[in-house]
Image (spheres, rainbow, N blue to C red):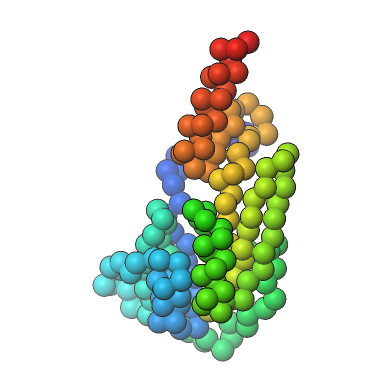
Amino acid sequence: MKESMGNPLHLKSLNHISLVCRSVEESMNFYQDILGFVPIRRPGSFDFNGAWLFGYGIGIHLLQSEDPESLPKKKEINPKDNHISFQCESMGAVEKKLKEMELEYVRAIVEEGGIYVEQLFFHDPDGFMIEICNCDNLPVIPLAGEMPRSCSRLNLQHMQRQQIQQVVQQ
């Protein structure tokens, strides 16, 4: 039975993503030094090499590959590939920093109804793609039945005030 709305599994939030790595140490350095994640304690009962990091309300669990050479090599940066996206405060500052760190990236702009979203895509050491964007510019609009939402609380509050003003003016 398909439920069209609601929360059938009673989910609360995204907890973590798990990534298989050629080198846990190299990936840890990337996620700490480039993206600002911090290492956290992982269960001592694990009998395999890995590391846990946390930042921005999400965990990243790095797992050492049992056969690093079998992992696919980095490929061309393709914004349509699997990726994780982070919102930022300043796209200009991010792009400047990526240039300083000599990280290869691809820039894209999405336009929807006069709203522009800037995106920067780059790979982690194992070829997993990262997106940095100002996606909170774009409201999250359900296809039916609910009020528009925003990826950021600040924009959500602004949108709610605008909707209240529209109702009062009618």
Q: Position of residue 29 (x, y in %)?
A: 41, 77
Q: Position of residue 127 (x, y in %)?
A: 59, 76
| Residue found 61% across the figure and 63% down from its top | 120
Q: Is residue 149 left or right of residue 58?
A: right
| Residue found 56% across the figure and 35% down from its top | 149
Query: Where 167 falls versus 19 (above or below)?
Result: above
Query: Where 29 falls versus 56 (above or below)?
Result: below
Quadrant of the snapshot with the C terminus: top right
| Residue found 69% across the figure and 60% down from its top | 108
Q: Position of residue 150 (x, y in %)?
A: 54, 39
Instruction: State the residue in front, 101 or 133.
Output: 101
Quadrant of the snapshot with the N terminus: top right
Instruction: State the residue in front, 92 or 7.
Output: 92
Query: Where 149 falls versus 69 (above or below)?
Result: above
Count of numbered labels shown in the rendering: 0
Instruction: State the residue in front, 49 or 126.
Output: 126
Residue 126 in view here:
no
| Residue found 67% across the figure and 68% down from its top | 106
Query: Where 89 falls versus 34 (above or below)?
Result: above
Q: Quadrant of residue 102?
A: bottom right
Residue 133 in view here:
yes
Q: Position of residue 49 (x, y in %)?
A: 37, 80
